[in-house]
Image: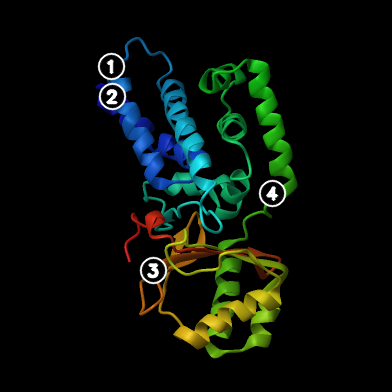
């Protein structure tokens, strides 16, 4: 078997690792691509998957640290780049989105961690890498790597999103929600929004969306009905976004293209994520 074949066998796994570490499709693909020449030159690798996972994780750590600096001047909320799949098992990224850890709500929680905490937590808790190897990635002692993961685990546990709703439940709730929105039935919309409902927008200061988190069913409903009154009800098509139902909206008049995805909990819409920053949508076909 050739070196390229060895690398190809693990590519989807590596994309999954890199995406969960960075929250960026572009960074994930670049990190995996950057690992290839290093792998091609290496000799005597006994555990190809482990070796590649470590190399990709180091590359992602550098990108995370750079991103942390950029976020200090970022306008509004920062959301991960959406991962669009077909929902079919033969989709090359189907295995990536099966994990609860790549849901939009879960990635938002990971963004609360420091780069070192995120790497330690994801590599250990999601991919079962030994702390000795994680320490090598981080350039710290094994004890320090354990501490990073422990602190991350406390943060994640305290802010963990609810379990993923069944697809049939998601579909039923969203159909009702969108029908109520399109017909202007505010009472029905309020009845379909969870008491803890939030709407988070990410325009990166480049296009219009909510700059700050909109909290509570009344405020979320007013926000969306205000947009509909001003711009009309948008045309959209359903897609799978990070393994959950969402929708793609092409640019329409003054409204920029965007991906919107939802978290459904207890038969209601708990969270709405509106990703409109064009830099995060370069891989999306509108």
Q: Is residue 161 above or below residue 153?
A: below
Q: Is residue 31 above or below residue 77?
A: above
Tell me the CA gap for discs 4 and 3: 29 Å
* Image side of residue 43 versus residue 243, left or right: left
Q: Percent position (x, y) of residue 240?
A: 46, 60
* Image side of residue 155 versus residue 76, left or right: right
Q: Percent position (x, y) of residue 107?
A: 57, 48
Which of the two residues, 176 or 60, is positioned nearer the viewer here?
A: 60
Q: Is residue 63 above or below residue 40?
A: below
Which one is in front in this view, the residue at disc 4 or the one at disc 3? 3
Tell me the CA gap for discs 1 and 3: 42 Å
Residue 2 in which image quadrant: top left
N-terminal-most mark, 4 or 3: 4
Mark 2 Cα-neighbour bin, 10 Å: few <14, some 14–19, many ≥20: few
- Kindly identify which numbered label has been placed on residue 160: 4
Residue that appears at 59% across and 18% down: 140
N-terminal-most mark, 2 or 3: 2
Label 1–label 3 contact, CB within 8 A = no
- Kindly identify which numbered label has been placed on residue 129: none
Q: Quadrant of the N terminus?
A: top left
Residue 185 in which image quadrant: bottom right
Label 2–label 3 contact, CB within 8 A = no
Secondary structure of the residue carrying tag 2 is helix
Instruction: Give the residue at mark 3.
Output: 257
Instruction: Give the residue at mark 1.
Output: 41
Tell me the CA gap for discs 4 and 1: 41 Å
Instruction: Give the residue at mark 2.
Output: 37
N-terminal-most mark, 1 or 3: 1
Mark 4 Cα-neighbour bin, 10 Å: few <14, some 14–19, many ≥20: some
Residue 219 appears in the rendering? yes
Q: Percent position (x, y) of residue 277?
A: 43, 60
């Amino acid at each position: 078997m050739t070196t390229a074949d060895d690398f190809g066998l693990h590519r989807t796994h590596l994309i999954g690792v890199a995406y969960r570490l960075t929250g960026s499709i572009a960074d994930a693909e670049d990190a995996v691509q950057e690992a290839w020449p290093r792998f091609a030159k290496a000799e005597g690798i006994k555990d190809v998957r482990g070796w590649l996972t470590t190399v990709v994780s180091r590359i992602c750590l550098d990108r995370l640290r750079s991103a942390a600096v950029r976020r200090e001047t970022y306008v509004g909320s920062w959301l991960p780049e959406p991962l669009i799949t077909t929902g079919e098992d033969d989709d090359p990224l189907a295995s990536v989105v099966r994990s609860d850890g790549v849901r939009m709500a879960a990635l938002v929680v990971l963004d609360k961690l420091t780069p070192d905490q995120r790497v330690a937590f994801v590599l250990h808790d999601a991919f079962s890498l030994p702390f000795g190897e994680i320490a090598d990635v981080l350039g710290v002692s094994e004890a320090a790597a354990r501490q990073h993961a422990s602190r991350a685990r406390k943060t994640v546990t305290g802010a963990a999103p609810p379990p993923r709703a069944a697809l049939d439940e998601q579909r039923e709730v969203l159909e009702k929600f969108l029908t109520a929105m399109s017909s202007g039935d505010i009472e029905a919309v309020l009845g379909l929004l969870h008491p803890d409902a939030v709407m988070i927008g990410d325009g990166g200061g480049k296009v219009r969306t909510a700059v700050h988190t909109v909290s509570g069913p009344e405020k979320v409903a007013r926000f969306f009905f205000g947009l509909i009154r001003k711009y009309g009800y948008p045309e959209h098509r359903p897609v799978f976004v990070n393994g959950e139902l969402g929708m793609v909206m092409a640019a329409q008049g003054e409204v920029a293209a965007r991906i919107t995805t939802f978290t459904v909990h207890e038969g209601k819409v708990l969270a709405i994520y509106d990703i409109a920053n064009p830099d995060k949508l370069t891989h999306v076909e509108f």
